[in-house]
Amino acid sequence: MTWNRRFRIREYVRESIWVVPLLGAVLGAIAGFAVAEVDRRANLPASIQYSSSTASTVLTAIVGATAALTGFVVTVTTLIVQMVTGTFSPRYMRLWYRDPVLKGTLALVAGTLTFSFSMLRRIEPSFVPNAGVTASGGLMVASLILFLYFFSRCMSNLRPVAVASLVAKAGRRAFDETTEGMARSAVGIESPHADTEPDQVVPAAKAGVIQAVDHDGLVRWARGHDAHVVLVHAVGDFVPTGGPLLNVYGGGDALERTERELNGMIAQGDERTIQQDPAFAIRIMVDIALMALSPAVNAPTTATQVLGHLGETLRMIGATDLWRRARSATAEEVPAVVVPVRRWEDYLTLGVTEIREYGATGIQVMRALRAALEELRESVLPQHRAAVEEELARLDATVMANWGDSVDRDRAMTADAQGIGGPNAAA
């Protein structure tokens, strides 16, 4: 099985809402069989023994309650999907589908349902699974408690700033893992063959967005074949069927076999994912801010709050020298594998340009954006400060274009981390 197939299966399991609940249902049925067998051999105290009619009534009620509870969980999930796609960003759904509490709640409810049904069908005039009836009641109580926690957590995480916080954490984690993985694999980011025609161009076997790259596998392949491999597109790019995917220098294997092997190390899908694409997390946070700034919503305070989490992510990226890390990690003079990576300027442009454009008429957005940029200027690496200065100059021009004749021009030119009303604002 190729690496990209294993990756797609792993991603499908992580994002699927039915796999874990199905496992819970199967485990519930297996546990029901095991508990019934134990029940036949155990001598339980009279306090937890039931008549066949009482046990049937209790288990019937539990089966009906768990079925209804499953409907509640599905209903809440559907409402969240509708709210997220209409208020935040549809791209956030990839993270929501991975929520372990959602899957755990459905798994416990499904397991309780199958366990209780298994107990119900084993009731006979001469045998009652007393321990199973008691365990079913305990599972029902646990399911209800977990559902209440799930519901409370969902309500809390529906706040735009909470969504931005979750996305920012995922983006920072992806950035760390990606840069560390590239350093471990000694992957370069500058092609030594920029002016040389490749010996072989590997086309994409299918159309799709590059979701992840097997850096370790590409390095092993390149070293094993005495070749250098250059990835033409960055993670997050859409590549059409037959479009150039990799340039190979050296090697010498048969064309068809090379294409099949190398395509198997590049995972493509329908849409981007944060796993090796931290810029996608920034894209989601910007989308949340833009939704808040749209005329239909008109919530500039939300955009101001998102800027805090966005600034934290940009600060972490701006404090990392990607070029030095890649060069120091490369043991060879010429790296075996080269992948395109975003510069600091690319991340910064992605993070602030559209918020500045769509929030130009919101005074608190202008003030919060200025505060975020001024803080970035002080915290990023020295070589990155020129890009921040450029963004501050663009912000000045935007403020003058929209507030030049306004009595509030001085306030729009002032930095305020809270947008309006912050204690450290000069105006």
Image (spheres, rainbow, N blue to C red):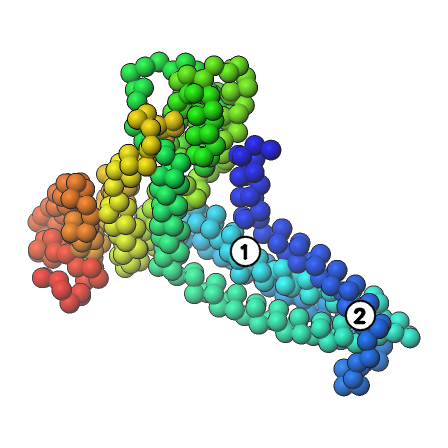
Image spot of residue 36 (x, y percent): 80, 68
Which residue is under mark 1?
78
Q: Nearer the viewer, residue 335 or 317?
A: 335
Q: Nearer the viewer, residue 359 or 337?
A: 337
Which residue is under mark 2?
38
* Res 267 visible: yes
Image spot of residue 21 (x, y percent): 63, 56
Q: Nearer the viewer, residue 108 or 183?
A: 183
- Could you tell whether 392 is left or right of 53 in the image? left
- Could you tell whether 362 is left or right of 93 in the image? left
Please name the residue shown 81% across and 72% down the image.
39
Q: Secondary structure at mark 1?
A: helix
Q: Which mark is residue 335?
A: none
Please name the residue shown 30% across and 20% down the image.
194
- Could you tell whether 176 is left or right of 6 in the image? left
The quadrant in which residue 76 appears is: bottom right
Outermost residue, front direction?
331
Residue type pointed to by label 2: Val
Q: Earlier in the sequence, mark 1 or mark 2?
A: 2
Residue type pointed to by label 1: Thr
